[in-house]
């Protein structure tokens, strides 16, 4: 087949990445895990002759088949990401495809759920299924057929811009959660799309970076989550932008055919990420089925390729048949799909609150700072911009517009009640202050300008700066990015148009002002004296509203001083820190942006009873940590984030979240530090030279202390572990132990089981790796016996010579505790091949 790779060349290409099947270590192939039943269950079979799908393919013209294989413009768009028109003549309906990592992204309102990283922090597969059910039900209610979610790429680098959209750094945790979310989504009749297949672990140069990764690293770290989604019945897979070992992921035969279809038995369809196609014959032959959002390669170019016999029409039939097979499975071809439900905002809000509360991670709590009670609850200073404005979600395809979202200041004041004093101080100004007319000549105000439709407006003058300083110019504007005003300072454009999709992948908080105007920023070092300023704006077809603001050292100092005064006047401080991540852009540092570190240090110095609440996408360095009383990690908490945060602060709920990623101390103490070939890549090439030592495994292997370890999280109560018993179960094992709540409050503990390396495998192995976990709720004084089963697959390593899983036999260490660095119980067991 043109473009297809033989099995021999595919094995060579990925170093043998196309596995035979999972083995229990004896070399004997084991049967693949049976897919889940229900509307999302994969059959692993091609359409039977005479089946509905085969019959439709026999009756379809080439043009009708092609219409299923690429995106088109929706004549009745709901604001979703993608659309295929179907074939009305044969009653094949259209498909609408919506983004959905944290809720259904359409033009209208939808439930804004907490970011998946916050869901994962609950360590609760049942909650992941409920999360999926909520999105699945609402997606169908909003007229969607396919959800472009969940994302299961591992957190490999702390800088990746989409870390908040995925589950964490551990493959076992990601696998268990993604499988349940897929079952939840598809149980409501919405087709799930697991993404981005594969090795899409950063945004920097994501459309071109060539990821060089060995077979074992890929199999043990990145691929288990995708395999789990396929075993759970995911109907679709989205190919990644990047290259893997020299070939673009969306035309990568070893991945799309070898691993996905031949090894795992996937019979759904593979679509591109948006504009991620690069060829016609090569992509189709490698296993791609659908191009999104248009048909540059699988539209007219494919029609021509079939006409000139570059591509056999049988390959078109194969791809169209895969799409139709999934549509048939979900009842979309015979009218068997259940009626679309109505939206239930109340049910969505309930789940959003439940997830945000369960996933909040208490990182630090000294001197009884939390929960807020007594005088601490009656005199509070709330500080920070995200204290007064709700921080709902990250930017890019994960951004959802909720029906309503309260600010933490509102919910804290409501919870504190009458008679309590809750003051507010901005602390860090992200939207800028008016430029005084006195520094402009002519003194035309730039605070709020309106330009009528079809009209133009211009300003040309002088900006006078009294002393050398850093100014951050902040432009607020209405309308699309392409129509924003042009601002030149000393002849240099301050806000140039970002290439590609950069203009549209903006953050979820700092890129929109409270009144809805879009926001752009530019920091400039200015010398004392006069500077030329030129602003031009066009009203376009609908008119334009804009304002140009700034922050300076003086305005920043005044804001910090105001926060310090408020902190000194209050018994307790709740300071909200933020970091606004988005698709399409990586972070440059794990430090909080702007001047927040200085703000937190000053406020904590003024009042040591300061709690820092972090609304960040991923890990954060904390040079101010020892000065604070408490730190609560809430990531991007969704529309009910303020209520969940308040419940945790006041002790109405007991924190039970745990970190799904290691927090480094600084930018030079993590797995990617000091190795540009490892990240962000050199000359378009990136090597995953850390192998299987990802995340906490690297910290253990290198003897580096993290700021906070994987699995860490505090509670308002305490837990004790006792009585570890280990027993064999086939090729796997069971860990049985007792957990007791030794405190005076009910709470949830996440018991974690870690297994050490096998002495019989001559491979680089982790010092310990997560082998199982259990979230348990206990009343004060209550004890519960917990059993965690560890499958043989979890105790196995990938053998790149045999291209299969090999059981790690021998005497294995098993540790149980509250984090990867807080192990309470330890035992040993002999692992052997089971029957």
Image: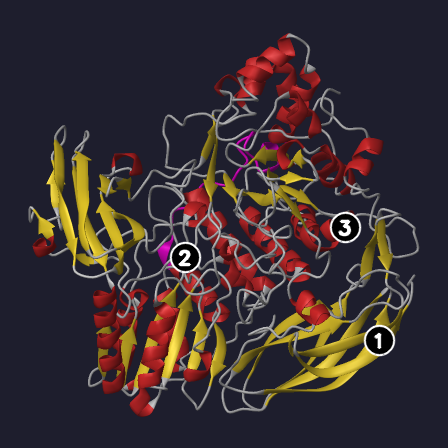
State the mark number for residue 33. Answer: 3
Residue 261 placement: quadrant:
top right
Residue 210, given in percent of the width and then of the height, sits at: 64, 40
Residue occupying image coordinates x 74% and y 53%: 217
Residue 531, given in percent of the width and then of the height, sits at: 19, 48
Tag 1: Cα neighbours inside 10 Å, few (<14), some, or many (≥20)? some
Residue occupying image coordinates x 18% and y 36%: 537
> Which is more N-terminal, label 3 or label 2?
3
- Residue in front for this viewpoint, 670 or 776: 670
Determine whether 336 is above or below 588 in the image. above
| Residue linked to disc 1 | 727
- Residue in front for this viewpoint, 779 or 671: 671
735 displayed left or right of 712: right
Q: Main secondary structure of the magenta part?
A: loop
Separation of residues labelled 3 and 1 (CA atoms): 24 Å
Residue 627, given in percent of the width and then of the height, sits at: 42, 83
| Residue linked to disc 2 | 348
Are the two marked residues, 3 and 1, in contact with CB atoms closer than 8 angstroms?
Answer: no
459 displayed left or right of 294: left
């Amino acid at each position: 087949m043109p473009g297809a790779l033989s099995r021999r060349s595919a094995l060579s290409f990925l170093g043998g990445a196309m596995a035979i099947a999972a083995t229990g270590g004896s070399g004997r192939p084991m049967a693949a895990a049976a897919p889940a039943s229900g509307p999302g269950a994969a059959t692993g079979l091609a359409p039977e002759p005479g089946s509905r799908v085969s019959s439709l393919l026999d009756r379809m013209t080439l043009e009708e088949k092609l219409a299923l294989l690429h995106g088109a413009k929706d004549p009745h768009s709901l604001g979703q990401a993608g659309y295929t028109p179907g074939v009305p003549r044969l009653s094949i309906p259209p498909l609408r495809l919506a983004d959905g990592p944290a809720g259904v992204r359409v033009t209208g309102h939808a439930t804004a759920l907490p970011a998946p990283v916050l869901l994962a922090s609950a360590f609760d597969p049942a909650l992941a299924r409920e999360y999926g059910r909520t999105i699945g039900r609402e997606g169908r209610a909003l007229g969607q057929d396919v959800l472009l979610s969940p994302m299961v790429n591992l957190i490999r680098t702390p800088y990746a811009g989409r870390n908040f959209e995925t589950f964490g750094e551990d493959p076992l945790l990601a696998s268990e959660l993604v499988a349940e979310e897929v079952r939840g989504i598809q149980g409501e009749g919405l087709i799930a799309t697991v993404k981005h297949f594969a090795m899409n672990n950063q945004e920097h140069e994501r459309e071109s970076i060539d990821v060089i990764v060995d077979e074992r690293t890929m199999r043990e770290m990145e691929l288990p989550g995708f395999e789990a989604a396929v075993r759970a019945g995911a109907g679709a897979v989205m190919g990644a932008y990047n290259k893997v070992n020299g070939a673009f992921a969306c035309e990568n035969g070893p991945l799309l055919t070898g691993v996905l279809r031949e090894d795992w038995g996937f019979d759904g369809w593979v679509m591109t990420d948006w504009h991620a196609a690069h060829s016609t014959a090569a992509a189709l032959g490698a296993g791609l089925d659908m191009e999104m959002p248009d048909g540059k390669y699988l539209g007219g170019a494919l029609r021509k390729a079939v006409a000139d016999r570059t591509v056999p029409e049988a390959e078109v039939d194969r791809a169209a048949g895969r799409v139709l097979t999934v549509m048939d499975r979900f009842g979309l071809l015979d009218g068997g799909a259940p009626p679309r439900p109505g939206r239930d905002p109340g049910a969505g809000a309930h789940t959003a609150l439940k997830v945000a509360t369960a996933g909040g991670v208490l990182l630090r709590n000294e001197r009884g700072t939390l929960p807020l009670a007594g005088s601490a609850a009656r005199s509070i200073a709330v500080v920070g911009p995200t204290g007064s404005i709700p921080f709902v979600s990250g930017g890019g395809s994960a951004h959802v517009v909720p029906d309503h979202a309260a600010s933490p200041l509102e919910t804290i004041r409501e919870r504190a009640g009458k008679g309590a004093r809750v003051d507010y101080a901005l602390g860090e100004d992200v939207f800028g202050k008016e430029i005084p007319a006195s520094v402009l000549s002519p003194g035309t105000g730039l605070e709020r300008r309106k330009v009528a439709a079809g009209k133009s407006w211009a300003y040309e003058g002088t900006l006078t700066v009294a002393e050398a300083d850093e100014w951050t110019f902040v432009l607020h504007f209405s309308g699309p990015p392409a129509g924003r005003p042009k601002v030149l300072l000393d002849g240099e454009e301050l806000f140039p148009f970002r290439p590609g999709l950069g203009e549209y992948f903006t953050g979820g908080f700092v890129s929109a002002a409270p009144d809805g105007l879009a926001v752009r920023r530019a920091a400039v070092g200015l010398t004392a004296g006069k500077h030329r300023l030129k602003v031009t704006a066009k009203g376009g077809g609908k008119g334009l509203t804009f304002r140009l603001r700034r922050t300076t050292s003086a305005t920043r100092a005044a804001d910090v001083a105001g926060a310090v005064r408020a902190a000194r006047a209050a018994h307790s401080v709740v300071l909200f820190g933020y970091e606004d991540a988005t698709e399409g852009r990586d972070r440059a540092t794990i430090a909080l942006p702007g001047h927040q570190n200085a703000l937190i240090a000053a406020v904590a110095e003024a009042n040591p009873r300061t709690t820092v609440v972090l609304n960040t996408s991923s890990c954060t360095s904390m040079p101010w940590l020892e000065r604070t009383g408490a730190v609560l990690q809430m990531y991007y908490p969704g529309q009910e984030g303020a209520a969940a945060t308040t419940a945790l602060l006041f002790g109405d709920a007991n924190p039970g979240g745990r970190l799904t990623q290691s927090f480094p101390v600084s930018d030079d103490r993590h797995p990617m530090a000091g190795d540009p070939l490892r990240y962000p890549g050199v000359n378009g090439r990136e090597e995953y030279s850390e192998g299987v030592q990802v995340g906490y495994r690297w910290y253990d292997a290198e003897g580096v202390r993290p700021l906070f370890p994987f699995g860490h999280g505090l509670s308002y109560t305490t837990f004790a572990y006792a009585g570890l018993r280990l027993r064999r179960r086939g090729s796997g094992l069971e860990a049985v132990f007792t957990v007791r709540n030794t405190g005076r409050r009910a709470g949830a503990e996440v018991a974690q089981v870690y297994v050490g390396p096998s002495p019989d495998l001559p491979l680089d192995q982790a010092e310990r790796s997560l082998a199982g976990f259990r979230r348990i709720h206990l009343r004060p004084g209550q004890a519960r016996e917990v059993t965690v089963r560890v499958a043989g697959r979890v105790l196995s390593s990938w053998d790149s010579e045999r291209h299969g899983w090999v059981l790690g036999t021998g005497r294995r260490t098993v540790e149980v505790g509250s984090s990867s660095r807080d192990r309470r119980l330890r035992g040993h067991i002999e692992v052997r091949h089971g029957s």
